[in-house]
Amino acid sequence: MNKNDLSGWKNVFTFTLVQTLKNKAYIITYIILIILALISIHVINMISSPDNTDMDEPIEINKVYVNNQTQLTGLDFNEIIDDERLSHIVFETLNEDYDALADRIENSEKDSAILNITHDEGMFRLEFLVSSGKKLSNEEWFQLSGTIADEFESFKNNPLGITEEQLRAVNSEIATEISVYDSEGNKVIEKDTSITYSEYWFIYGILFTVMMVNIMASTQIATSIVTEKSSRVIEFLLISIKPLALMIGKILAMLTAVLVQVVSLIIVVFLSNKLSSAFSSGNSGAGLSQLLPADIFNNLNPINILFCLLVVVLGMTFYAALAGLTGATVSRLEEMNEGLTLFTFVNMAGAYIGIGAANVLTGPGVNGYVIFSMLFPLSSPFLLPGAILTGKAGPLLIAGAVVLQLIFIMLLFRFVARVYEAVILHNGSRIKFNELFKLYKSGSEEGTL
Amino acid sequence: MSLIVRNLTKKYGDKVVLENLSFEIKESGVYALLGTNGAGKTTTLRLILGMLAGNGGEVLWKGKPLDAVNANVGYLAEERGLYPKYTLIDQLLYFARLRGVPRDTAMERIKYWSERLMVDEYIFPPKTRGRKSKPYKAEQLSKGNQQKIQLMAALISDPELLILDEPLAGLDPVNTDLFKSIIHEEIAAGKYLIMSSHQMPTIEEFCSDITILHRGKVVLQGNLNEIKKGYGRVNLFIKCESDISSYIPRFGLTIVKKTPGEYHLKVQKEQQAMDFLSQLIRDNISIIRFELREPSLHEIFVEKVGVANE
């Protein structure tokens, strides 16, 4: 590979990028994604709070008739409920005809409810009966039923003479710990490195996004190369530019086009969050703050963002080069899916290694498998960005991963440079990978195609 | 300025697809590569252009190894190709940029060639009802018009060396003449051309030197006129109003082909034909056509490839 092999890549880059950005499918996809991103936070807010309920307003139930069908006595919820949204509710023991009361609630006393308490097969059941016209949000029902259930728990234990403190002691979880002491007798304290549930989903979300973007960009690159081959434009291009420069220009253009989409989407999501916060009252910014780990913004600094981008771009460059090579082994568009099988497999394998490591991270400690996944160039682009943003990957690990990615990219480009010229003009059935290795061994001057 | 091809060889594994091809183009004009399908013509052109790595030999242009990326070379590939979904003007400007042609110059040349090849309405669509029409994409053009666009791409850098692989294949008679006139103009402008073709009359019209390839090997090479002279005027075409079949064996002539009323005969010496003609005149046989000539390139080609097959 020398300088002459790469000259002209900028022309390919500019042309491919401009044509991709002008492409109707790209523009339509872009607009749809932007619209979805723009409304995404608002939709999340609507789903989590569908009727835009004010969280401070009292719940619209004024009276609850308690129909106690158990052996428990002294159930008086009036004394113990101190929640601001529920304190106005009057609890009254049912002492009239049940059906008549139910009719009254349905027809006239719509702000009342019947609470049926039953005990059957070792289980207490608390059931509310309300008017069919009564509209309470799920969130309000959860609050009411949750509070009643908590209070009922203490009633349930009272006859046994169990205090709340005793109950807590009985229900306490059992944890074991093995402590290590150093030679001076001081306890060696190991920091808990396990990630939270939301951090896991955050890493998983980034991993999945990178995987999808990677597959999207790589497929576009392979398609573009196969199109040039099948439409025979490649013959004309090759008198003006070396195949390697052609591939590099194409890869960088496609990556740029995809990154433009992804970066725009991220910006629009944050913008949508801001707008959603500005226009909603009470639960401002609920959308993103519900999804992102609480301390995510502690790690969101320019250096970490730069590292993430570097790792993702290097990883995608590696995968794109692999897709480019795969595209060159195919001569017809209809054979492309078959040609991309191995590429998709490698891509999925990398992502699954990352998912496995994210699972391991939910437990205490960071073991060899996690470190391997963060360093291994096939999995690091998927796992490392999430790990960096959750503070689970230090500078040394990032540097190691970047160096390994660069080595892998150079080795792949060396391989590609040697076989690409022979492969790109090949017209016929798909070239298999063992044939590529033969070609590499024998050198492009002694092709076996 | 000359192009020297020396001992060019290409193998795929054990299969030799081109064996020690050598020729030289000393002055401007057209050099022809002829051969049956799979003879190695396109492989030769690709090797000359450096698209394929060879297994031996060299190509010198102006005394230095030819580097098509940096030299001013134009190429019209046998298998035509354009980006189907991109506009013609975008593609042509891209090809020009890859050849290092500045944008302004490229636009001037695109305008010139589009008018010359009568495709300007597709590249610069006229305004309709005061509105600018949508520029054409390659997929909206007929095959012949796509071929014109590709010729424009080959000529856009005003190349010193122009390589045309089957340039007239698939063209209608009008466009064939148009392409021919452009090739004549390029020759007149002192360009070096290498052309491969199956159309023998076209080769005879343009080319002074030829190479006939068969299964990767050279079966005939040299100056076309000298090759023909070497054969001599041994082809006699005669058409008479009455039957002359009884005369033919008497003069030791061999029948190559007989069509109603016309014979294509092979003679050993020109004198045989003259004696034959004198006898027919003496016998008052009305002669419609009498032509004694060298073999055509088509006949030489068929003969050489036939011998090579044997």
Image (cartoon, coloured by chain):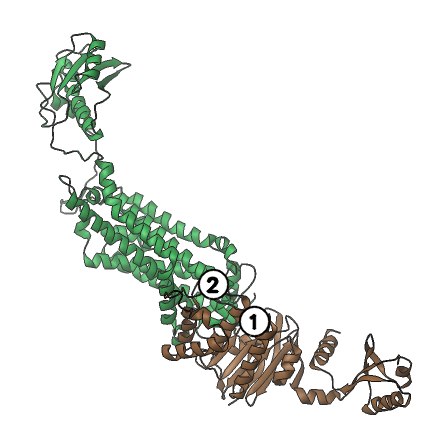
Q: Is residue B175 above or below residue B278?
A: above
Q: Is residue A128 left or right of residue B153?
A: left
Q: Classify mark 2: residues with Cα within 10 Å, few (<14), some (14-19) or many (20+).
A: some
- x and y percentages locating residue B227 in the rendered image: 69, 87
Q: Which residue is mark 1?
A: B78
In which image quadrant can residue B197 be found? bottom right
Which element type, helix, strand or loop, lies under badge 2? Answer: loop
Mark 2–mark 1 contact, CB under 8 Å? Answer: no
Q: Is residue B254 above or below residue B129?
A: below
Give the tally of numbered discs: 2
| Disc 2: host chain | B
* Residue drawn at (13%, 45%) of the image: A186
- x and y percentages locating residue A421 in the rendered image: 48, 69
| Disc 1: host chain | B
**Label 1 sits on what residue type?**
Glu
**Residue A259: in sight, yes or no?**
yes
Q: Classify mark 1: residues with Cα within 10 Å, few (<14), some (14-19) or many (20+).
A: some
* Residue drawn at (63%, 83%) of the image: B205
Q: Is residue B132 above or below residue A287?
A: below
Q: Which residue is mark 2?
A: B84
Which element type, helix, strand or loop, lies under badge 1? Answer: loop
Picture quarter with the C terminus of chain B: bottom right
**Outermost residue toward the front in this view:** B129
What colour is chain B?
brown
User: Looking at the colours in the rendered structure, which chain would you say is drawn in green?
Assistant: A
Q: Is residue A316 above or below residue A203?
A: below
Q: CA distance from mark 2 to mark 1?
A: 17 Å
Q: Is residue B123 left or right of residue B297?
A: left
If you read the primary sequence from the N terminus, does the residue marked by circle 2 or circle 1 appear first? 1
Q: Tell if the residue under mark 2 belongs to the same chain as the one under mark 1.
A: yes
Q: Is residue A431 left or right of residue B263?
A: left
**Front of the two marks 2 and 1:** 2
